[in-house]
Image (tube, rainbow, N blue to C red):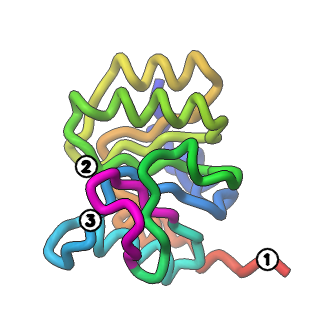
Amino acid sequence: MPLTRDEDIAKLLKNARTIAMVGTSDRPDRASYGVMKFLQDSGYRVIPVNPQITGEHVHGEFVWRELAQIGVPIDIVDIFRRPEAAGEAVDQAIFVGAKAVWMQLGVINEEAAARAEAAGLKVVMDRCPKIEIPRLGIPRIAAEA
């Protein structure tokens, strides 16, 4: 079952440091663009993933083609894709050993969620961290020494 209790979602967000954002856009009018900036301002390292803009930079971070290229541990894979395309991102998250997948508002894919959970990943579905962080009163993540 995806995480639904406030305590579980807050714990996931408080313990995360690195978020890979699949479907990041370089367009300021897109939700992923604003959510990425919000997460960075909240202290997270956000690594953008989008094969259509690979090699460019969004909010100062290099855009990767796929999760397997990143090469650093990923706490949460934040998925900004259509529900039917979320499964591919979930499979990549499992492959790279991410700790959790977070499907954005409107992204509901029960089969992909079940695969992630079966592989030991935590799952959040149909929510946005830009909404949840202030709602849950999560303080800015401190930079690690």
- Estimate how packed mark 1 is, as few (under 14), some (14 to 19) or many (20 or more) residues with alpha carbons within 10 Å: few
Q: Residue drawn 71% across and 80% down? A: 142
Q: Position of residue 102 (x, y in %)?
A: 44, 45
Q: Nearer the viewer, residue 113 or 82?
A: 82
Q: Position of residue 31 (x, y in %)?
A: 22, 66
Which amino acid, mark 1? Glu
Q: CA distance from mark 3 to mark 2?
A: 16 Å
Which amino acid, mark 3? Ser
Which amino acid, mark 2? Leu
The residue stretch that appears in magenta: 47-58
Q: Which of pointers 3 and 1 indicates the residue nearer the eye?
A: 3
| Chain-order first, disc 3 or disc 2 | 3
| Chain-order first, disc 3 or disc 1 | 3
Q: Residue drawn 49% across and 83% down? A: 41
Residue at numbered disc 2: 105
Q: Is residue 13 above or below residue 97?
A: below
- Asked if residue 105 lies left or right of residue 135, the reply is left
**Element type at mark 2:** loop
Q: CA distance from mark 3 to mark 1?
A: 27 Å
Residue at numbered disc 3: 25
Does 24 lie within the magenta span?
Answer: no
